[in-house]
Amino acid sequence: MFMHWSSLLSTYRLGGGAGGTGKRSVFNQDYGRVLYSSAFRRLQDKTQVFPLGRNDYVRTRLTHSLEVANVGRALAMELQDIICEQENADAFSPELQRMLGCLGDIVSTACLAHDIGNPPFGHSGETAIETAVRKLTDRKEYSFEGNAQGFRLLTRICDPIKDAGLNLTCATLGAFTKYPCTPVSRDKSVYKKYGVNEEELPAFRTVAEQCGLVSLGQDIWARHPLAYLMEAADDISYLVADIEDAFVSHIISYEDAVSNLLLLSGAGNTTRDKIEAERVRGGSRAALRLARAMTIGACIRTMGETLRLHYTAIMSGTHRGSLMKSSGLAPAHAQVSAFSIKEIYSHESVIKVEVTGFNVMMKLMELYMEWVDTPGTPLGRHLGAILHADPALSDDPAYRFSRVIDHVSGMTDSYALKTYADLFGTK
């Protein structure tokens, strides 16, 4: 089976609604809906890697997402050329040709939203939620997945339009979903994670049907081709950004930073000479900015070549793994990742944030689970009020559990710390 762009670029919205107005396409509307959402704004106060407030230079989840969106748009431009090369694009209808010009909007919107479901304190926050649920309930196999929570936000609970979330197009939702399966349907040989909770499965079934995604079994599908671009943009952006931020935060040396960026870009001595000349003119930070820009540009070109090579497999739903791992950059990416794990992510300042985040999130989860288990007690009723629970739904244990997960995972770092201080009487 071969996926077709006439279906993949579906403008259907799960909650209904009109198409684009004037010169704005429906996909450009999607971009605005994510950009102006409260969930996206909260990313400005969520740790990317380094402690917020350490300095004004390092990325937050929000600035990281904006950078990913920029890279994603560049990759979409590469894909447009590939489609024209490998398919008879001249035979496409005028409407489809116009919609192909919107690939940048679709991919950049998916990139904007790619971290929108992540809890405060990053991976330590995810671990704390999972640990608390497994410890306090009979859900011993429970796992919190930021990708699936992101799909839930976009389709149900983010600035909601009657259970439709932001009411995005199916094309954008398909591009957003990196792991199109549920925890029940996931095949570990195909996807390492899941991207859809069981509650949102009906919504994704509609996305898959509208976009014409290839079925790989019961409730598991091949990725939307644009999801590969979103993933590649993130793979390029986070590693480059973490190297730059680590240097600015005095965690790694200038030489280590430049050497790793050059390794990732595959550049030679000529590029190093340009970077050193920039260092003489403008200093180390200016030189590193140049190295970062050149590395991102080189990675985008390589991803474009990889996309061209694997285009048929991607469109037929048979490609496995990421574009990065399928590219010539894979060995360098693995080497730079290993360096980052050893020298950056294991640094004391990073670990302290993770430990703090884990403890704060665990305590909040343990407290709120009291409402899940005993909603009728005085404490339970107070917690229900704090969580702004819907009285008409609060008798349902499943609703109470989802409400706690939605509330805690939606917090910012600062709000989680403040809530902890308020509820436990400590600072």
Image: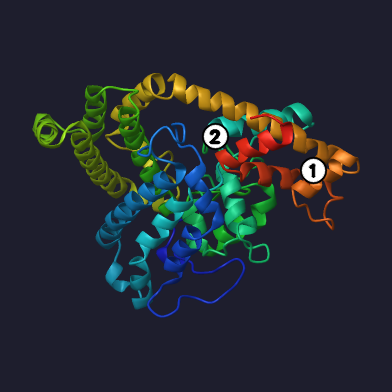
Instruction: Answer left or right for 362 relative to 309.
Output: right
- Residue at 32% from the left image edge and 26% from the top image edge: 336
Viewer-side residue, 46 vs 283:
283
Q: Amino acid at mark 1?
A: Leu
Answer with the quarter of the image where residue 2 lies. bottom left
Q: Is residue 200 left or right of residue 250?
A: right
Which residue has dot 2 on it? 121
**In the figure, residue 244 lies in which quadrant?**
top left
Which residue is at the front of the view, 172 or 295? 295
Is residue 394 depicted above or below 250 in this figure?
below
How many residues crowd around disc 2 within 10 Å: few (fewer than 14), some, or many (20 or more)?
Answer: many
Instruction: Assign the C terminus to one quadrant of the image.
Output: top right
Q: Residue at x 60, y 42 (%)?
A: 415
- Classify 285 as above or below 179: above
The mark found on residue 202 in the picture is none
- Tag 2 secondary structure: loop
Tell me where residue 55 appears, x and y as whole percent.
38, 35
Q: Secondary structure at mark 1?
A: helix
Please say whether residue 141 is visible from this viewpoint: no
Q: Residues within 10 Å of mark 1 (few under 14, many from 20)?
A: some
Position in image of residue 119 (x %, y %): 58, 40
Badge number at residue 383: 1
Q: Is residue 153 left or right of residue 61?
A: right
Of the image marks 1 and 2, the number of the one nearer the N terminus: 2
- Work out whether residue 270 or residue 409 is closer to the camera in this orientation and state it: 409
* Residue depicted at 34% across the width and 37% down the height: 241
Q: Nearer the viewer, mark 1 or mark 2?
A: 1
